[in-house]
Image (cartoon, rainbow, N blue to C red):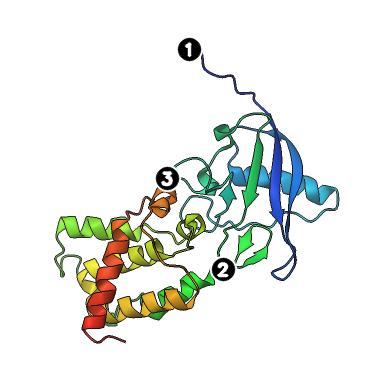
């Protein structure tokens, strides 16, 4: 079977959510974009669209981005119904236009969650995640010179499990895909990597209780263990992080943490 021919340049129809402000009524707006290279990233394609909009005096589409290397978690948006687009283990900035075909229609929306209110177009306020971290996602550390690397011995399997959880970039895809808008995978990842490492021990119980309670206060929904969050997580955070979060929370409650 021969490979499908992909042109050097593509013409695409984009259907994008436009919302001028948090209180404004939003709607889907259609755009045509030409001269798209398959080697462009998705954000570069939006840059091309925004340049054309600016040149004709229209308001460019607002979207978040920063590192454009799949590290910062800023570039979240829903593409054709899937957070971060069709490729697994990929952020929007790492998604390339070769994942699409000439003449495709692409629907682009912001994260949809009460705890992530739309600021403008595809940009949402994710400061709820910051407040969850501030509620307890820290460790005590004595001031002074850094300790020797081997001063605290950590088994290799524990260190690897902690690092796997610590790869969470806080993008919010787990919230966007969940029918309950749950942040359990995010909170579970943060609690997992801090609870596994000995440096996270002193605040372990208090941290879990405070972060879970803050998650509830922010308006995120409950987890119903359906696994969509794991499927769209660009860093592949395992669903077991949610089980860890629940264990840590109930452990903290038993210890009387507040």
- Is the residue marked by circle 1 packed among few (<14), some (14-19), or many (20+) residues within 10 Å? few
Q: Which mark sits nearer the N-terminus, 3 or 2?
A: 3
Report x, y in % for residue 193. 29, 65
Q: Nearer the viewer, residue 205 or 37?
A: 205
**Residue 154 occupies which quadrant of the picture?**
bottom left
Which residue is denoted by mark 3 in the rendering?
A: 89
Q: CA distance from mark 3 to mark 1?
A: 28 Å
Tell me the element at label 2: loop
Tell me the element at label 3: loop
Instruction: Name the disc covering residue 1, or none.
Output: 1
User: Disc 2 vs disc 1: which is toward the camera?
Assistant: 2
- Is the residue marked by circle 2 packed among few (<14), some (14-19), or many (20+) residues within 10 Å? few
Q: Residue at x 66, y 28 (%)?
A: 102
User: Disc 3 vs disc 1: which is toward the camera?
Assistant: 1
Which residue is denoted by mark 2 in the rendering?
A: 114
Report x, y in % for residue 64. 60, 58
Query: Seen in the image, is 202 located left or right of residue 86?
Result: left
Q: Residue at x 46, y 68 (%)?
A: 221
């Amino acid at each position: 079977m021969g490979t499908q021919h992909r042109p050097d340049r593509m013409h695409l129809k984009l259907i994008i959510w436009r919302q001028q402000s948090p209180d404004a009524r939003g709607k889907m707006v259609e755009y045509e974009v030409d001269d798209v290279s398959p080697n462009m990233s998705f954000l570069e394609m939006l840059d091309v669209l925004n340049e054309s909009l600016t040149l004709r005096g229209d308001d460019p589409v607002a979207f978040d981005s920063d590192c454009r290397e799949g590290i910062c978690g800023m570039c979240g948006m829903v593409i054709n119904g899937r957070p971060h687009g069709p490729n697994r283990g990929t952020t929007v900035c790492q998604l390339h236009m070769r994942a699409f075909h000439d003449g495709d229609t692409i629907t682009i929306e912001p994260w949809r969650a009460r705890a992530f209110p739309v600021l403008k177009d595809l940009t949402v306020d994710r400061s709820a995640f910051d407040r969850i971290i501030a509620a307890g996602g820290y460790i005590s550390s004595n001031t002074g010179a850094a300790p020797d690397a081997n001063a605290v011995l950590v088994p290799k399997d524990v260190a690897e499990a902690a690092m796997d959880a610590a790869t969470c970039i806080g993008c919010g895809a787990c919230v966007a895909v969940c029918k309950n808008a749950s942040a359990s995978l995010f909170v579970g990842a943060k609690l997992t990597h801090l609870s596994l490492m000995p440096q996270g021990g002193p605040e372990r119980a208090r941290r879990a209780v405070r972060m879970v309670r803050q998650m509830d206060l922010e308006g995120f929904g409950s987890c119903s263990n359906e696994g969509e969050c794991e499927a769209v997580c660009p860093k592949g955070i395992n669903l077991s992080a949610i089980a860890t979060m629940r264990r840590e929370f109930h452990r903290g409650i038993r210890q009387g943490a507040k």
